[in-house]
Amino acid sequence: MPSKTSTTSSTEEGPATPGQPEDIIPMVLTSATQQQFGCVADEDVTGENPYKLLQKDDILEDMRTKAAVSDFSPVKQMILDYPESELLLVYDRDFTYGQMFYLALTPEAKERILNPPEAEPEEEMEIEIQTPEPKEWISLGSEKEIDEESVKETREKFIYKFSRARREFGSPLSLSDRNVADVKDGNVECLSYQDRRFNIKLLQRDCAVQAIPILQSSSAQTLWKFMRNNCTQYTPGVLKKDEQEKSPPLSLSDFCNAVTNRVLHVLQQEEIMNVFKDDWMALGTDTDDMDWSGKVSDVLMLNQAFSDPNYCPGKEIICMHWHPTIPSVMAVAMREKKKQQLIKSTGPLIVFYSFSDPTHAKILLECPDNILAFEFCPSDPNIIVGGCVNGQVVLWEISAHVARLHPVQHGHHKHHSVKTDTLGFEDKKDNKAPLVRYSAMSGVENSHKAPITDVHWLPQSFEVTAQGVPVENKSNLSVQLITCSPDSTLMFWDIRMPRQVRQTIPEKKQNDSESQMANYSDNNPFKHLERMWKPFITVALVNMERNGDYAPIKFNLYPFTNRPNTTNTIVAESGGDGGDGGGGGGGSALGTSDYSQLQVPSAKGLTPLEDINTKIYIGTQDGEIVYTDWKMERNDLDQLLSPKPLHFFKIHPCLVNTIERSPFFKDIVLTGTSLFGSCNIAIWKEGVLDGPLFLFPSSEGLCTSACWSLTRPAIFFLGKGDGKIEVWNILEKTGEAVHVQEHMTSGKITSIKPWTISSKQHFLTLADDLGIVRVFQIPPVFHMAYRNERANVGKCIHQQQERLNDLIKRREVWESQKPPPPPSEEQKKVEPEKVGTPTTEEQDVMKEYNDFLVLEENILKSMGLTP
């Protein structure tokens, strides 16, 4: 068995192991020391013979030779004080005291270990076993269920008697073959048939279901390899004399000078063009005239992978977003795995990566708890909002560190000069990612009561009042956001200072408070939100069918068009300059530091916007798709109430993890779920309340994420729990994916995002539960649109809508033609008999009866018997 070695020579005395005697000390011996003193583990000393006597002089000589590097240097004084010439070293295979060996420091300890005292026999103790006393039977109704499930005889048994004549006993038999058709009724066949006299309906059935774990068997074979002594000898290759004369040796400098121009030329060609590209296959790639199907590869190629070994191990990625203004930067939210036990944990983080250094984080955002969703501010990407598992909303401001995210320009970088004397051991403390603390966080009492699962900013083109009415946004900045949680609520938040807070500042201290706030705004422009941040609208989602509320998981707003704002663009690009680059004067020219000066305006002076669509799609925890409005309604008592949902659909079998709007059609919505069921993916059209336009069948594996293509209207991507990516095309196939690529990652895909840098660079980003982000290059067959593809998708959607309308009309006709069900016995007893339209026979009888009454009246009058 190979010996166990350690890379460290020895350790200082630390805290003693519980139960460790004071006269022994654990030791760490390297393999060289073990061979020197003849105590190699599992060879010289074993579990059956673990003792080894070491000469004190040999140990002292080893300490003189190796000095502080010696394995015995930590116990040098104890060895010098030892009175005898031999010390006892014991091999501890079970690591009883924490190390592989331990050394006896006193002769008494050596004697006690070599000759352990005999254990005294333990006295046998009589154990009295008490039999539990039976308790009185308490009936809880189980005997009734057992009695109902038991089989009982409900009728008398039938008695059949079969007899045979006595004379036929023992008579000889004569058997022969005959044809069935020779004799009439020679073959009687009893066929099953349906007896119309009986019509048995199954009203109730008791079924039992037992959930059992899936049986899995696996085996492993461990190879046993013995240690062997091997040696390898190398001989230098020497040129012969004639070869040396033909090729005289060149110095290293001459060689570098000779090949430098060629190397630089090759590197320049590699940057200008792809030398490995097949030009023949790339001929005729005009999207207006050619069809890419079957002409080029449809494989997604790995372009880059992001993973920081300091923060990623043991964590999974929940959410990710690309930076809105810096194309090569992305941010991911990571949390620790539930079943992962780590010795060193960094806690939940939001990590920023850059293409310039994919293995090292650029910025770390400190999170008070696990973040399930976050998003950049549309008007200022230096502001980030996130939702925690505990229901709190967190806000970060990273303008002081945004310079680390920009690509390094070597011509202006202060560390561009190369120092040859450092030999690669230069200090890298400056490159460590800074940990940015959050600027504001909502209070627990004013937050969601369940984890925040989705968050979205409202656009800068409008803002919302406390009644949910969209009004004009004079600041032209995104200052409001919406969050959702399974606690059945949607909450609206505002990052500006509330009006009542400004009113509480005394007039005599107004100047002092303004100066203090101006000084603090350089560091934290959202100080006014700390411990006071609360939602100004809370929309409750009341269930339309049963008691209770909906539990939202994802929601999607209508894609509003922002008005152009060049000032905010300048602020975003110069975010790390301390706010000086925020633009000139004017109400909308606010830098990051000016957010502390913003105040919630009065709704009376704002113009309502009637053309804003306030309806949203919501995916719930139970698989419903809810279509509702966020505008508050007033009841008869003039109280503001949450609006009732306009419509809901139960399509998905479990929680909805994806709600994405098409980048080409604003009214087309893609939804997906994460469990097996009758349907995993559905496509809806806003305004069509009869159901989804497309229902895609469930495929193998869990669907964890979905997204639309940014360049092709007919294509969307699906991420699976087994690491696969599926590409679907609604114009080609609706029953199966047009392309399936396996082994994209070894873990479960948790999020996918498309990303476009230029017209020739299109990427698909994958995040998994192993803490790794992979960027794949989308092949041209999936990112170059066909001719008139958008128009064809519009026609397909229109046809599906007409098909759905026709199906609804047919169902109405079928319902009207269906005969009414017969009334039950209870309805017959409760409902009175209704007088129907009389038949022809009844009308004749009534006519005869009326004629008889008229004749009777005439006879009585003629006889004078009537008044």
Image: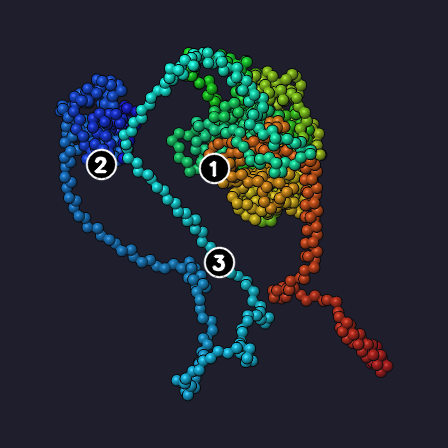
Q: Nearer the viewer, mark 3 or mark 1?
A: 1
Q: Is residue 61 visible?
A: yes
Please rate how many residues cluster around mark 1, counting C-alpha atoms within 10 Å: few if below 14, some from 14 to 19, many from 20.
some
- Pick whichever of labels 2 and 1 is earlier in the sequence: 2
Q: Is residue 547 visible?
A: no
Judging from the image, the colouring scheme is rainbow
Q: Nearer the viewer, residue 358 or 615?
A: 358
Q: Which residue is mark 3?
A: 207
The label number, if any, that marks residue 47 in the structure image:
2
Q: Are marks 2 and 1 in contact (CB under 8 Å)?
A: no
Q: Is residue 115 left or right of residue 92?
A: left
Please rate how many residues cluster around mark 2, counting C-alpha atoms within 10 Å: few if below 14, some from 14 to 19, many from 20.
few
Question: Disc 1 on helix, strand or loop?
Answer: loop
Counting from the top left corner in percent of width and height, residue 700 is at 52, 45
Counting from the top left corner in percent of width and height, residue 643 is at 64, 41
Name the kind of residue labelled 2 in the image: Gly
Name the kind of residue labelled 1 in the image: Gly
- Depicted 704 relative to depicted 259: above or below: below
- Pick whichever of labels 3 and 1 is earlier in the sequence: 3
Q: Which residue is mark 1?
A: 747
Outermost residue, right direction? Answer: 862
The label number, if any, that marks residue 620 in the structure image:
none
Q: Is residue 223 left or right of residue 459?
A: left
Question: Disc 2 on helix, strand or loop?
Answer: loop
Q: Residue at x 54, y 20 (%)?
A: 266
- Depicted 781 relative to depicted 365: above or below: below
Whole-Å distance between the Cαs marked 2 and 1? 42 Å
